[in-house]
Amino acid sequence: MSTDVCSLLGCGIDEEHAYEQSAYEGPLARWCPGCGDHMILAVTQRLLFEEQLRPEQVVFVSGIGCSSRFPHYMKTYGFHGIHGRALPVATGIKLTRPDLHVFAVMGDGDCCSIGAAHWIHAIRYNVDMVAMLLDNNIYGLTKNQTSPTTPQGHPSNTQPRGSYLPALNPLTATLGVTNASFVAQTADWAPGHLHATLEAAYRHKGFAFVRILQRCPVWTPAVFRDAAQDPKRNEILVDAKGIHDADTEKLGGKLVPHDPSDLHAARRLAEDGGAVRLGLFYRDESKPRYDETRHQRAFAAEERIRVLDQEFDRYAV
Amino acid sequence: MSTTTTIPPRARVQRSKEHILEVVSDSGEGAQKCGQSFGAVSAKMGNGAWTVEIIPAEIQPPPRTPGSASGVRIRIGEREVTNWGDEADLCVAFNEQVLLSRHRLGALKEDATILVENMWATHDDPLVRTAWEKAMEELSGRSYRIVGVPMEEQCLAVTDNPRRGKNMFILGLLAWIYDRDMERVREQIALQFRKKSPEVCSKNIELMELGARWAEANLDFRIEVKAVPATAPMVVMNGNQALGMGAMAAGLDLCAMYPITPATSVSHYLGEVFESVGGIVHQAEDEIAAIGAAIGASYAGKVAFTVTSGPGLALKTEFIGLAVMTETPLVIVDVQRGGPSTGLPTKVEQSDLLAAMFGQPGDAPKVILAPATIEECFHCMVTARRIAESLRCVVLVLSDANLATGVQPFVRPKLDPRWQATPFDPAPVPEGMRPYEWDERLGLSRRFVPGQPGGMFVATGLCHDEGSKVTYAPEVNQRGCEMRSRKIAVFQQTLLPPPVSGPDEGDLLILGWGSTKGAIEEAAERARDEGLKVSSAHLSFLSPLQPGLPDLCRRFRQVMTVEINYSDRADAPFVAAESRRLGQLAYILRGQLLLDVDCWTRVPGEPLRPGRILEAIREKLSKGVAR
Ligand SMILES: Cc1ncc(C[n+]2csc(CCOP(=O)(O)OP(=O)(O)O)c2C)c(N)n1
Ligand code: SF4
Ligand SMILES: [Mg+2]
């Protein structure tokens, strides 16, 4: 494809320049040492580099939280908004600028608590974007409060005798919403799998929901310790149509065959069952996309005025 | 031009500069259609007209109850009509219960003429007959002139379903009384039923003509309100339609909203037509998401607006602050209703001014403007979009339920393509330029849009410097606040003083804003006719304020705002200078300009009547206190 065709189609690949990886790298990230967000950032930058996206065609939208600092460390456009509301902003961007590549980065408090209404509706709108849930099972930025995904019994500053309720499961919740089109889970400690997952999510036409299990060595050092240190405990969903990462699959975790078009099986597998399951739970690209359905061509000013003038005829006295 | 029917010798013609009539029925009986057609025909003939709907609180209230009163009030005049007026001169009621509702609300003149369906007097059901008798007894306390009209009985001659045809019969009756141009009435009916079969249309015309014939044979009065056909082409619509059309004229791309009365009908209107100019109405999952989507679209180079009412404005608060902080252009329309809380969902109030101005925690300077007429509802959208884009700021438009449902003819605007937003330019950002490179004097900076090479930056609600880098350095926050404020100050320099209606000095100046303009000006004019030295001025901009107010106020002995929001009466029990709560514009004027401004405000859930404002003026001038 020539550059012109590319830019016309908005696919964002510019054959004239090859972008270096550094073209996507912003200032040094200020997360704590050992924070899982560092790896997620690096893998994301790598993906953009491999896809050779034009940095000006990419927008990272976030809410508020440690994880929501993400856009600042990219060298693309970014919108660091307010707590819980990344998805409405991302929806507004993609709805009116389908040529842009939109990524929404959220924390578990951000997405599953204060922004839960938007989360449910964004799944249903199925607007073409990558939604990354950086789930550390805790409120990180505000220093250790219980989040909806905090494991039951895990103490925090707001629930020092342990979280009272069973944790909310973002996967079953997402899979329960009508019109869900892409649901995957991956982890910061499995970079190859993380990469393959983000790549599949980026390529997916629709709302690609990726829950990324993210280690927070400061507040929840224990929640993913076993899973990260002993990958054999994890289960990897495998299928020809699924997400494939040889490195992760070699680590000795149980390989669970799963056809990602099977919604019922996906829901069953997403249920908590002890082991951490990584992989593509569900994908259906035939689901209607709100951004596509609502797409409007651009009208010139004169054209708009002409239509409006006719509209005035209807109200003429 | 009007075709004169032969007037029976006994029909007395009463000439009047203006007249107020109401048509009320049970909800669903079509009084609104009848009234609106009458209003449209009157406007076409060249009368000034203001039409406002009478809306029951429930969707399907029980019939034959005062609560089911649904209909329309039409005020027609020789000249332009700017408000709904005082009490009605004439009322057509489809049953005595809906009539009672108008009576109890004090909507009818002491000597109003009432035309009421009389079949209820002799109804088979004794309960109905008793209800009728009781109602007549209650009404007899006034000197109404009540005329029974056998509406359904008459309509039976043309249709088997007279309940549904009555409204056209009444249209004919009114057309005869007010000597409307019959050809125009027929055209109006044809227009109204254009989507129905020709038989339906001709049947309705037949019913209308029947009404006119019945009136001619049975009524002994007619009313003449001279009409001077307009020379300029006119259009007629309500304020929410005008806002929607204004959005299209301004070249807005996205209307993101969540349904809320009385704002929703803007999106109903746009839902029908916006796509024909490439626009999108996005019904979001809530008001927060709606403004979020609008901000996203604006950040991405489009200009978006969100439309809501009080409770929705409350929800949007945090995002408004974000738009201010990120300097994302945004138009917010608040069609105000009664508050606080769910308040009076369908009724007018002007209680959101302070919330609009100060509702966001932190310093959030913005532009606030308020249309005063239906015509201004159209033009203000163009203005709002332009300001939002050129200042990279939030513009809040305060309309209200009175404008939303009021229908008034106005001169058809000459549309101009330059009103439209210019599509964003994807050219690279000049080397080295930063996203908030404020011009020190003006506080203005250039907007970068995704897609522009070299412009990559992260918009953030955190304190940031010119490069949008997050920093908590004390001087940076001071400077950011200063720059966001300065551009508003710069903008204020472009505004004109509010024009004065009446002499520019005197004993009392009334200041108002929004939909009360017509009623205030009318009241002041009537006061001047009584010899009182009263003038008025109406503010189009509330933030920043227009220039010239201190000078203007000094030329009057007293200054008073008139507003539809709550304030304590100065002489109310326990009220002291420290505790007296003021009208919202009064607060602003006193705080901003150190002016001794009093206020007279009411929250009746209906537009202010000019007669009531006149009383307040008289009180104020005789006692120094308006009650
Ligand atoms: C409206 C609002 N409420 C509360 C906060 C405070 N707050 C900031 S981040 C946060 C939670 C962060 O947790 P999470 O979303 O899981 O992100 P993390 O820091 O763990 O990445 C809270 C409660 C806020 N900024 N805004
Ligand atoms: S507190 Fe936890 S989540 Fe936040 S930066 Fe530190 S390690 Fe990461
Ligand atoms: Mg978290």
Image (cartoon, rainbow, N blue to C red):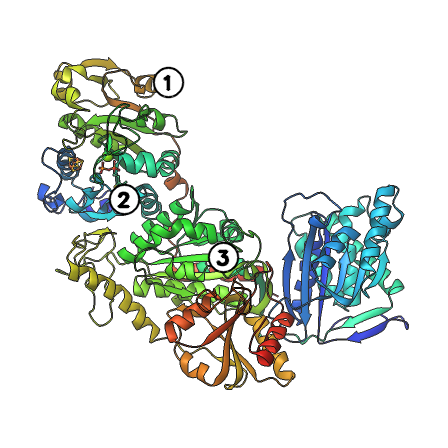
- For disc 3, the marked residue is B335
Work out whether B180 lies above or below A13. Answer: below
Q: Are marks 2 and 3 on the same chain?
A: no
Callout 1 secondary element: helix
Q: Quadrant of residue B625?
A: bottom right
- Residue B532 is situated, as x and y percent measured from the top left of the image, at 60, 84
- Residue B568 is situated, as x and y percent measured from the top left of the image, at 52, 64
Callout 2 secondary element: helix
| Rendered residue at 17%/58% (across/down) | B465
Three-letter residue code for mark 3: Val
Between A123 and B545, which is closer to the camera in this rendering?
B545
Q: Earlier in the sequence, mark 1 or mark 2?
A: 2
Quadrant field for ligand 3? top left
Q: Are marks 1 and 2 in contact (CB under 8 Å)?
A: no
Between B510 and A206, which is closer to the camera in this rendering?
B510
| Foreground label between 1 and 3 | 3
| Foreground label between 2 and 3 | 3
Q: Quadrant of the N terminus of chain A?
A: top left
Task: Point out which mark residue A264 bears.
Answer: 1
- For disc 2, the marked residue is A9
The chain containing the residue under callout 3 comes to B
The chain containing the residue under callout 1 comes to A
Q: Quadrant of the C terminus of chain A?
A: bottom right
Q: Quadrant of residue B91?
A: bottom right
- Residue B358 is situated, as x and y percent measured from the top left of the image, at 37, 60
Mark 3 crowdedness (10 Å alpha carbons): few <14, some 14-19, many ≥20: many
